[in-house]
Amino acid sequence: MELIFEGIRKALWLLATLDPEVMGITLLSLKVSGVATLVSLVTGIPVGAALALSRFPGRQIAVGLVNTGMGLPPVVVGLFISILLWRNGPLGFLGMLYTPAAMIIAQTVIAAPIVMGITLAAMQQLPKKLRLQILALGATRLQVVWILIREARLPLLAAVMAGFGGVISEVGASIMVGGNIKGYSRVLTTATVMETSRGNFATAIALGIILLLLVYAVNLVLTHVQQRERPQ
Amino acid sequence: MRPAAPIIAGESLRIVRGGAFILDVPYLEVREGEVLSLIGPNGSGKTSLLLTLAHLATPFEGVVFFAGRRVGADCPVLEYRRALAMAFQEPLLFDTSVSENVASGLRIRGLKRSVISDRVAEYLDLFGISHLRNRSARSLSGGEAQRTNLARAFATKPRAIFLDEPFASLDPGSREPLIDDIQRVLEKTKTTTLLVTHDLMEALRLSDRIAVMGRGRIHQIDTPDEVMNRPVDETVAAFVSAGTVLAGLVIEKRRDTFVVAVNSEEIESAGAFGVGESVGLYIRPENVTLSIGLNAVGQKRVTGARNVFPATIVRIMPLGFYEKVLLDCGFPLVSYVTHQSRKALELREGQRVSASFEATAIHVIARGRREPPEPSSC
C-alpha cells in the first residue's frame, strides 16, 4: 500500500511541478495516439460505412476480417510494422523505424479496425428504409453516406473513445517500433514499462495515474458530447 | 373528358426472387394530377411496385418513363428522384429539429438559404406543425412525426409524391385529422399521388383511381365506383367486399334473370348468363337485409326481394358505427346492421332470421363454363 501512496504522491508532485520530462512524455502520448485515432477515423469510418451499405461477394469474409482486426494483438502489429520498416525491409528506405511516425502507423493499424467495426455496427443499426428515404429525398450517393454517418454519430463517438482508448494504452507495438528513446519516442506506456523494470515503482505508478487521468479526461469530454446529443 | 396524360409510366415491371414473381406488372400509368391508390392485402406487391416506379427497388426488370422520357436513359435517375418525393409508413425522421427535417430535401437540392427558410415556414404551417419547429424530431408523437415526414416530402414541391401507407401506424385520433389535411393539401397543390394502402376506406376517400393488387399483379385498375361495384374477378371482389363472394353454377335462364346453384340453395340474379356457366356472386353486406320471424314452416319469409333465405346468426362483430353479422343460409352470407337495428331486432348469435337481397344487388363475375350438375331429387 505504501508503494501506491508513494506513487500517488509522486504523480501529484510531477503534475504540480509540470515536470518537463513527464510533460514531454504526456504530450507525445497525446500527439501520437491523437493523430493515430484521427487517421483511423478518416480511414475507418468510410470503410465501415461502405461495408455496412454495400453487398458484394466476399463481404462476409471482409466483415470477419474487420471483427478479427478489432482484437489485433499490438505486439503482432509491432512485429509486422518493424519488419516492414526494418533497414532491409520493404519500406526500410523511409528510415522511419524508432520514430514517432512509426508509432503512429502502428497505432493506426490497431485503431482502424476498431473504428471500422463500430462504424459497421452503428450503420447497420439504422432503420433499413432510412437509406431509401434519403435516396427518395433526391440525395446523391455521397450525400446518402454523409447523412447516414451523421445519423449514426452517437455510436460513432463510441468508436472514437474505443479507438483512442485502445491505442493510448497499448505498449507492445509502441515499444517495438518506437524504441522508447528518451525525449524522442518515449510515451506514457513505454515509460511505465521501463520504470517498472528498473524497480522505480513510484514513478511507474505516477505515470500510470497520469495515463489514467488522460484517458478519463478525453472520455469525459466525449461522453459529455454523447449524452448531450442523446434523445430525450 | 379525356384522361390526363401520364406523368409516370411503368412497362414490363418485374421482380423475381427465388424463381417466383414478387411483381409482374405489364403496364401502369400515373396520370398528371390524379391520386392513384394501390390497394391489396399484405404481400400483394404494392410497396414493391411503388419502389420500382421510384427506381428504388433493386434489381428489377422493366422500364419507367417520366414525362415521356425513359428514366436512366433520357432522364437521369437523380433528376427523376428529385422530381419525386416519398413518405413511408415509419416517419424515418433525421435526428435533428422538426424544421431541419422539413428543410432536408431542400438542402440536398442545394437551394438558397432564404428559399429554404420560406418554404419550411410555408409547409410547417400547411401541416399545422409550426409550433413544433424547434422540437427534436425524437420527441414527437406518432401523428406529429408523420406530419413532419409529409411536410418534408411536400416541401420539395414534387411533380409526384409516393406515399407508402402513411397513416397505417397512427391511432384514430391522429389518423383522421391527418387524412383530412392530406386531402386538403392534395386539393390545393394538385400533386400527382401514388398512395399505397391496405385500407379500402382510405383509398375510397382520397383516390381518383384504384388499382387492386394480389400476388404481384394488378387485377383491376379503375375508378373507385367501378372497383367497388363491378369487381373484375374474385380477388378484387374478396378484397373490396368485406362481404360475400360465392361460387356457383347457372342452372336456369329466365327472362331478365338467371338462377345459380350455390351448395344446395338457389340464388336468383339479374343478368344474362347461360346455363352451365360457372360464376362468382359478389354480394355487398349493406345490400343484405335481416328480418325476424320465419313463416310457419321455418322457411322463407315473404318479402319483395327475389332472394329470401332462412338463416342462423353465426357471429356478430362490432365494427365501429355498425355491426357485421355472419350468417349461415346453407351458404355463408355477411350483412351489416346498425347498432340501433341490432337492438330493435334483438339480434343474437344462434338466432334464426330471414336474410334477403335483391337480384339486382348481386354483382356476377364469369368464372368459365362447366357441366351443369345432375338435378337433385330433394
Image (cartoon, rainbow, N blue to C red):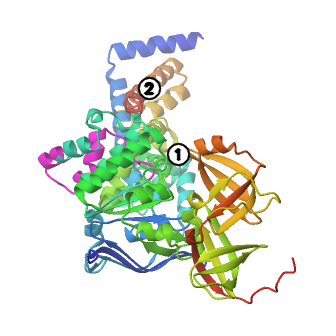
Q: Is B79 colored magenta in this rendering? A: no
Element class at badge 2 = helix
The span picked out in magenta is B89-118
In this rendering, position of residue B37 left or right of residue A143: right
Q: Is B117 colored magenta in this rendering? A: yes
**Which of the chains bears the disc numbered 1?**
A
- Amino acid under disc 2: Tyr
Quadrant assignment for the C terminus of chain B: bottom right
Q: Which mark is residue A216?
A: 2
- Amino acid under disc 1: Pro
Element class at badge 1 = helix
Within-10-Å neighbours for mark 2: few <14, some 14–19, many 20+:
some
Residue A200 x %, y %: 51, 21
The residue that appears at 47% across and 44% down in the rendered structure is B170
Residue B148 x %, y %: 33, 44
In this rendering, position of residue B39 left or right of residue A224: right
- Say whether mark 1 and mark 2 are on the same chain: yes
Instruction: Quickly name the residue at label 1.
Output: A74
In this rendering, position of residue A13 left or right of residue B115: right
In this rendering, position of residue B253 left or right of residue B76: right
Residue B113 x %, y %: 14, 47
Q: In this view, does A215 lie above or below A69?
A: above
Quadrant assignment for the N terminus of chain B: bottom left
Q: Which of B287 and B226 is in front in this view?
A: B287
Residue B77 x %, y %: 30, 71
The residue that appears at 61% across and 60% down in the rendered structure is B288
